[in-house]
Image: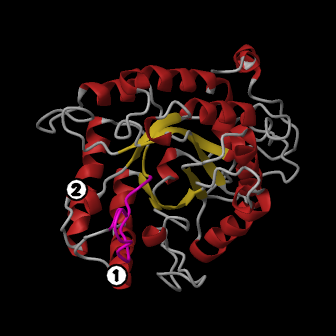
Amino acid sequence: MIAAAALSLAALALPAAASTIPARDTKCFPYNGAEIPQDLSAPNVTRADWWCPQSMAYGFQGFSYPLENGDCNAYENSVDGMDQDFKRMKEDFGATLIRMYYPGCTQPSVFINAMEAAARNNMGIILQVNTFFGDDKWRQSQQAIYDAVYNPKTNAIAPYVVHSVEFGSEPVGDGMDGENLPNDLGKLRSGLKGFGIPVGISEDWDRPNRMSNGDNSGLGDMGQRVKDNSDVAHIHPMPFYHDWNGQVDNAWGYIKWQTQWVVDHVGLPTMISESPWAWYDGGQGSHSNGHADLGRDQYQRYWKAFDDNCEWFKQVNVGWFIHTFKGEGEFDIVDPNGGYIIPNWKPRKC
């Protein structure tokens, strides 16, 4: 349930400017030189003038960042824990955004800490409501986001560090909120409207008769209702699942087709938020068990195919995230020894 105070303050949610930052000229956030005030005060510009235009939001953005430990006091849920990882993402890969993934803590602290850690590194962050796989517990996760953006510590900076909010990762596939999902998505969108923060879901749109229609010529009923209540499309073109025995070198064709389909039929600012490939078989019960084409070399070829197609991403104005940084085992780019599965590599900006 949205806190009554949050609703009553919605019209006042965008805080008064505090720090002095010149009007945009050529600087903007997060791609072109604008810097977040380290005291977490609001820059002296509107959110619209602060964030870089959509035309710059293509190509590599950053990483999905699992935070699945439900212990809110765990180190990985702390400012320092996140700061350490965000710094690596930025310095080693040139990341500009972080996508929170399955935050297990349902207290506002995890979102407050994420905003502060992102600000420390001059990076934007995508907050996410945890679906909890259909459990009604998602409402606690959503409320924690409201409480975090209205918290006195982060209220001023929230519009300037929060890129967007995802109402779940695969909420349609996981059965979160059933047929009422588009309505509650719309309520979240309205609840954050005063901040100007875009809202959408992170989802696989290749769900015939649901997200797409039966012959892929348009949207399905759920897809249309989701689109009508969204500002952004964060998408999951996932050849790893849609062709279980497929080869990694055939994956790009599916990614390109599905991404173009969303651009053509959804027509909202689009980012590939989730498109994993495993580098080892995680064993029984894992997502990768029995998959035919796994290995470090395959993992490298998969992600370098994204990088090799930078010009296409620029043409269609779509950004992409590597899924994941660490915490998901076989999908992680961080090696168990602390190094990287793809060493000495920074995705390019074309």
Q: Is residue 161 above or below residue 48?
A: below
Where is mark 2, residue-wise?
242
- What secondary structure is the magenta-colored segment mainly? loop
Residue 237 in percent (x, y) is at 31, 53
Q: Is residue 73 above or below residue 291?
A: above
Is residue 53 visible to the viewer in this orientation of the structure? yes
Is residue 35 visible to the viewer in this orientation of the structure? no
Q: Is residue 346 left or right of residue 218?
A: right
User: Does the magenta portion include 284?
Assistant: yes
Q: Is residue 142 left or right of residue 311?
A: right
**In the displayed image of the protein, which residue is found farthest to the left?**
215
The local secondary structure at tag 2 comes to helix
The front one of 136 and 326 is 136
Residue 263 in percent (x, y) is at 31, 43
Task: Give, as a three-letter code, the residue at label 1.
Answer: Gly
Give the quadrant of the C terminus: bottom left
Residue 183 in percent (x, y) is at 45, 19
Q: Which span is picked out in magenta?
A: 273-288
* Mark 2 Cα shell of 10 Å, populated few (<14), some (14-19), many (≥20): few
Quadrant in the picture for residue 157: top right
Give the quadrant of the N terminus: top right
Residue 175 in percent (x, y) is at 38, 34
The front one of 50 and 120 is 120
For the point 81% across and 47% down, the residue is: 21
User: Does the magenta portion include 339?
Assistant: no
Q: Is residue 299 left or right of residue 165?
A: left
* Mark 1 Cα shell of 10 Å, populated few (<14), some (14-19), many (≥20): some
Where is mark 1, residue-wise?
295
The local secondary structure at tag 1 comes to loop
